[in-house]
Image (tube, rainbow, N blue to C red):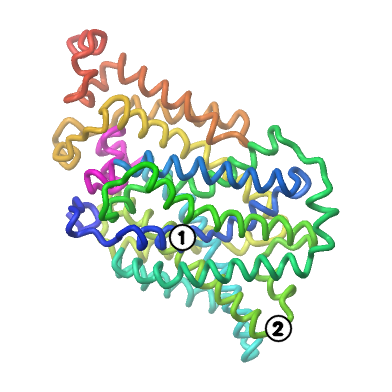
Amino acid sequence: MSEQETLKPQEERNFGHFSYLFMWMGGCIAIGVFAIGSSLIGDLNLFQAVMSMVVGTIIIAIALVLNGRAGNKYGIPYTIHLRSAFGIKGSKIPGLIRAVPALVWFGFQSWVGAGAINAILKTMFGFDSIWICFLLFQGIQVALSLYGFKGIKWLENIGAIFILGALAYMFYSVINRYGLEISSSVVNIEGSWGLAFWGGTTAFIGQYSTMILNVGDYSRQYKRESRSLLTGALYWFAIGPAILFMGLIGLVVTGATGISDPVAVFTNSIENPILMTITLLFIIFAQITTNVLNNLVPPVYVFMDAFKLSYKRSVVLVGILAIFTFPWKLVTEESAAGLAVFIQTYAAFLGPIFAVMMVDYFFIRKQKLDVESLYDENGPFKGVNISAIIAIIIGAIVALIEVRLSWYSSLIPAGLSYYLLMKHMSSSKRFLVGTDMESDPISSQKINM
């Protein structure tokens, strides 16, 4: 069993309060948020856009607190936690579902970072080859990931302060340059507090919904016991500024210029070559910290669990697969709105997984996991829990009826159907061993049939 799959006792954990805050701060600068902000043009005014970001980050922080409890308490990673609801073999299904958007974002953000590297090299040395920069950048990120969470800790701690300062400067530069155009395109429009507003919050939540699922991979590295208010505040102060700055930059710049490619925006809007280089370095560094933490390591764990690969081989595999997501197609101007739809669509599948995990941990198991059984290939969690699979299918179907509200609308159908199926479906009886529902009259009747 690899280090990534084993329990993580307190004395082996890497992150204190500040390191944990900086890890999330450095890992949450997703250039995709720029595209989400761009997609709000014409639908929301400036105040509505800000509120959609605030509401989104509050919901994200609450979800991270709730789903991070098990990882922090028991030291188990996401792939092991999934076994409680889905079974040992069944856990591979939600694991792979979570891995797909991570691969897409890894490729997308690597291409953006490569574009920034290429812009610097072109300005300073006249070298121009986006493909060489892309392959080089992929290799750097793969190499950094081979060091695991100990390598990630110093990377995020150094990066967080630099990233915050650079974000503030970028926002100032954008407002200073495009201030006059902002009023007509963003401020002086009616906007909507209805479907467009909640669809915007769904897009922001969807951007981080992958992290919501596997937050246990990070919370099990947190040295302190997870307390709701403190941990929620750490999550919000890490994610909130990133979403607000990046989302507003995307909204303002695209509204003023029609340009949605972040590298093109800053190479065109910053005239001082030194400041432009610093800004592009920020984009490069932001992609490394975000990609390594959120888009490379999580699918690595999934591949290790699903295909029994080593950590190093899984890292290399993720790096290769990300190339085949065709990221160069996703950075085009016509893709900005499409990225928001993509996020809302995969949120329709990630929301139900989150709901099943929450109902299983809080309502069925009452925050008590038989960790030894989760690692027992021949124990009560072997095979597939059909109830969990049916529940995520039900949740996804409901969510896709109105994709702009996908994450929200999936929660109750998926969570409720999972609870009822666990209560009444005889094939799920062995998954109830050790819970209060094991002795429930209705469940017992089904178990004894």
Q: Dot 2 surroundings within 10 Å: few (below 14), some, or many (20 or more)?
A: few
Q: Is residue 190 magenta?
A: no
The boundaries of the magenta stretch are 70-93
Tell me the quarter of the image containing the C terminus.
top left
Q: Is residue 381 left or right of residue 62?
A: left
- Which secondary structure is most common in the magenta stretch? helix
State the image coordinates of residue 393 (x, y, percent, origin top left).
Answer: 45, 29
In the rendered image, the quadrant that contains the N terminus is bottom left
- Which residue type does callout 2 highlight? Asn
Q: Is residue 410 left or right of residue 141?
A: right
Question: Quarter of the image holding residue 265?
Answer: bottom right
Residue that extends furthest to the bottom in the rendered view of this protein: 125
Is 84 magenta? The answer is: yes
Check residue 272 in the rendering and tell me which mark sits there, or answer none.
2
Contact between marks 2 and 1 (CB within 8 A): the answer is no
Comparing 353 with 440, the one in front is 440
Instruction: Categorize mark 1 by other alpha carbons within 10 Å: few (<14), some (14-19), many (20+).
Output: many
Q: Foreground residue, 17 or 247?
A: 17
SS at badge 2: loop
Q: Is residue 411 left or right of residue 254?
A: left
In the rendered image, residue 57, in percent from the top left (x then y), is placed at 53, 46
Q: Earlier in the sequence, mark 2 or mark 1?
A: 1
Q: Which residue is mark 1?
A: 25
Dividing the picture into quadrants, the one containing residue 320 is bottom left
Residue that appears at 18% across and 39% down: 371
**Can you say whether 130 is above or below 186 in the image?**
below
Q: Residue at x 25, y 55 (%)?
A: 223
